[in-house]
Amino acid sequence: MLKEAIYHRPKDNFAYAYDEKTLHIRLRTKKNDVESVQLIYGDPYEWADGRWQMNRSPMKKSGSDELFDYWFISIVPPHRRLRYGFELTAGDERIIYTEKGFYREAPDDDTAYYFCFPFLNKIDVFQAPEWVKDTVWYQIFPERFANGNESLNPEGTLPWGSEDPTPISFFGGDFEGIIQHIDHLVELGINGIYLTPIFKAPSNHKYDTIDYFEIDPQFGDKQTFKRLVDLCHEKGIRVMLDAVFNHCGYYFPPFQDVLKNGENSKYKDWFHIRKFPIRTKPRPNYDTFAFTELMPKLNTENPEVKQYLLDVATYWIREFDIDGWRLDVANEVDHQFWREFRQAVKAVKPDVYILGEIWHDSMPWLRGDQFDAVMNYPFTNGALRFFAKNEVRASQFANIITNVLHSYPINVNEVSFNLLGSHDTPRMLTVCEGNKQKAKLLFLFQLSFTGTPCIYYGDEIGMTGGQDPGCRKCMIWDEKQQDRNLFEHVQKLILLRKTYRSFGSHGELKFIETNDDTNHLVYTKTYGDETILFIINNSEREINVTLPFSCKGKRLTNLWTN
Amino acid sequence: MLKEAIYHRPKDNFAYAYDEKTLHIRLRTKKNDVESVQLIYGDPYEWADGRWQMNRSPMKKSGSDELFDYWFISIVPPHRRLRYGFELTAGDERIIYTEKGFYREAPDDDTAYYFCFPFLNKIDVFQAPEWVKDTVWYQIFPERFANGNESLNPEGTLPWGSEDPTPISFFGGDFEGIIQHIDHLVELGINGIYLTPIFKAPSNHKYDTIDYFEIDPQFGDKQTFKRLVDLCHEKGIRVMLDAVFNHCGYYFPPFQDVLKNGENSKYKDWFHIRKFPIRTKPRPNYDTFAFTELMPKLNTENPEVKQYLLDVATYWIREFDIDGWRLDVANEVDHQFWREFRQAVKAVKPDVYILGEIWHDSMPWLRGDQFDAVMNYPFTNGALRFFAKNEVRASQFANIITNVLHSYPINVNEVSFNLLGSHDTPRMLTVCEGNKQKAKLLFLFQLSFTGTPCIYYGDEIGMTGGQDPGCRKCMIWDEKQQDRNLFEHVQKLILLRKTYRSFGSHGELKFIETNDDTNHLVYTKTYGDETILFIINNSEREINVTLPFSCKGKRLTNLWTN
């Protein structure tokens, strides 16, 4: 057995509390190298005759990626404490793997050899709101969804959909537009909307906030927003807003005060000014998002700034009963701020959802003390490479997805925010080069995957568009121009997800078969007695697939054709 | 190159902020498999002509353990943001390792491939108090250090050192005793004392607290304690107390109230009672430390309990100006409690030291939001196996120590609490089977090691004793019975550590040579221009060692003989 490939380190994705009673333990070994793994475990204080009392239970192989196999076991330690090691077997070879290294026999004279999960404290368990697992999100870029009140149009507003958007164009989308089109959302079957920023800001995207306590007048007023939230709730739809706390806009009054008063400004420590006087060219001499002088980075370590932003976060929950915060550029803000953010918002509404925008591996934010989820771009990336771009074949796709799933605890995966595109990426159909069949497979995979899927407005009716601003075109409301067939495909998938618990986040995913020649893929989703078999043919040709089990004595239903 | 052995995951010990400007990046590869590693890195927003602008810098090999080599680089990113990957070379083979896997060439069309250290936020930097690096601790078990006021003797107190201790014997050690013997500590040169619990408790060890706001009368009163702290401070000695917050004593009034009033007790949620009525036999039906009915586990998730314990923690700092808290059974208490504990105590005294008792791998407590250090038992264990027990040879010892050092960030190592024994282990001289030469080598290694060493009372004068209660004998004050030669050895090492910055925590340790035949070991400690060479002969024979460098043009001083 290849010792160098064997990996385990307690907490994070390798040893974690799944709930207040249950621990999950995982082990990584070289692919196809180990035949079986047993967990050796016990309570650290359980001794008899000078020997530590150990139990043994078999672990199961929960998946494989390109280089590794992953092993899994779920354990309920009676006293919430666990010491444990692993017994690995391959042919005649048997090794014991512990915190202190490798042994031939499992030592029982001391528990100090073993890995330690000291105590399962409920308060430390990663716990996202229960409703999230059953949510299908719909992302709305408010300026482009629907113009329901032309009297609010900003100066220079263009006729709806009259041309392709530029970085500075306005089409007058607003809350009234969303309200008027709520039936579209209800018909589709989604039950959560995520709105990109709605607070006062000069740009069309509103990521350059001027006033975090005010709605941008182009979208409507607070009363209209309240009406929107209430209507959504009435329809069973949750509402998530976008918190742009990493940076403000250039015209945010405190920053303007610093521009005016320099070192004498009482807001000078609200930002990271490297030198006075402030200059913006060739590059700003203050910290910004990227190198954009229009987005000065906020000093979230400053207690005044922290209090201000936490007041913002709780205000919109308390006054408007919103259900979630999506956190822009979340990983560039300090962890301490997010810890206090979580405490503050959950104190006001315990089941509010906290979603961080992080494009990379995100374990440090998903330990239970900060976010409930991150935008799962590694999922996006893997799915697009296989279904849309043909960059990887079936087996490599399964490797990528298995790797993503094993990068986090299962309770994290269950609420992960799985998107196929956003206002920051080319649209999925465009990545598919217009191939609707590919788009349909993408939706099938996304909607049957563990986590909480998000549909970017218009993707469900076949809208196209490249990188921003292309992906921010006006929503098409003329049904004749909508791809209703694609709409019905997505609608049907959402309905299946709602109908069968195994279809969505409650189901455990297992890759059964991947074939790189035919490029087809078979996986199951299982919840209790219910198993759904998915056979995906990601090729241009018809293929025959033999069912991976005997049908004898089983009741089979074709869920797609009913 | 063995891909399965290559490991990196951002944050923790692999990518961390060393200070507010500097990032440390580490990579693990198979031992002797890779010839050189370059870090490929840049600011994520630095693009030109559609290409990400990358830099390359060589990493150095910072050490090896049994299976792996570790590579290291220190980077100061100008805008505190970093994306990075690794270029590994061995012979003609060259691979690029990124967050998304392995490549032949470093991709420059997207930074999403790369590992991400999103932003270096000062507040998240692990920062222990500066003074700790230069502290040599001395652990006192108050009941056994010195009896300075016989009028405080508990009933049944035995004459000092008249017999070997049992689990229940009393010898009357007290604060007055410590005060009277402060010169011993000053002479030895230590500058920090850690006192095991001093609060009101029935046992001799006081880990079964009855009143966290009161001194146990057998040790003295608050005034005497204040005198002790002031005297220590006068002599440049810091004082650390023991916080037993995982559990209380059976006679803690709130627990007594629950025993008396059962479910009607207003303290019933202060503990984890699994069932009423409470029983203690055969095993307690409430959570305890181990299975000890005398130590009921406190429910530190209960806001009342939390507030009570945080009040205790801040009270002793505010009123008595103590310098540190050692946290008993720290890993069985919830992380959330410790995060709030840190905020509370650092608010009262920003440079207070927080030391957790954890015997295992402890990364989850050392991320900057909880502890400053843990009791480094993996160090203890490695050192005793090599020097005291001859269980491992020189090379394996170097492997163990290198592994310990690479399990944590360097700023964590610098304040790690390195002990050779405690009130919970057999004494080091006993583990050495009385061999004083071995004990001297152990002290040499401990006192020249990175971190903050702790001497268990009496070890410096050659006291012996097995597992508790053997290791808790009365301190020997009769100089004729003390091993003064050993005392002078420790004293000299402490003086060297104070004199040369490279000797202690400021010096970087490098193993230069290990020889399993002779069982000797050569390592250097370097700080700036100053390098100290340590040659340790862990055998019974005299050996000749060739200096690992030419002496030509160098000024050499024998620090030991001067």
Image (cartoon, coloured by chain):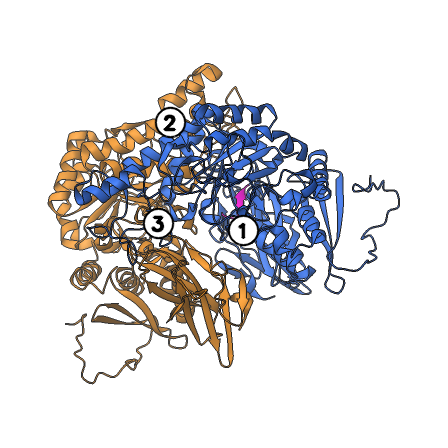
Chain colours: A orange, B blue
Residue that protrudes farthest toward the right in the picture: B552
Question: How dense is the environment of label 1, judged by Cα within 10 Å: few (below 14), some, or many (20 and up)?
Answer: some
Q: Which of the 4 quarters of the picture holds residue A65?
A: bottom left
Labelled disc at residue A375: 3
Q: Answer whether residue B191 is visible to the viewer in this image.
A: yes
Labelled disc at residue B470: 1
Query: Which residue was labeled with disc 2?
Result: A305
Q: Which of the 4 quarters of the picture holds residue B236?
A: top right
User: Alpha carbon of mark 2 to alpha carbon of mark 1: how far?
Assistant: 56 Å
Q: Which residues are magenta?
A: B12-17
Labelled disc at residue A255: none
Residue drawn at point x = 23 percent, y = 53 percent: A136
Q: Is residue B91 left or right of residue A385?
A: right
Question: How dense is the environment of label 3, judged by Cα within 10 Å: few (below 14), some, or many (20 and up)?
Answer: many
Q: Is residue A131 left or right of residue B369?
A: left
User: Alpha carbon of mark 1 to alpha carbon of mark 3: how far?
Assistant: 57 Å
Q: Is residue B396 above or below residue A287?
A: below
Contact, CB < 8 Å: mark 3 with mark 2?
A: no
Please state which amino acid type lies under the numbered disc 3.
Met
- Residue A386 position within the rendered picture, expressed as x and y whole percent measured from the top left: 39, 64
Q: Answer whether residue A205 is visible to the viewer in this image.
A: no
* Disc 3 secondary structure class: loop
Q: Nearer the viewer, residue A454 or B225?
A: B225
Contact, CB < 8 Å: mark 1 with mark 3?
A: no
* Disc 2 secondary structure class: helix
Question: Mark 3 or mark 2, which has the lower sequence index?
Answer: 2
Please state which amino acid type lies under the numbered disc 1.
Gly
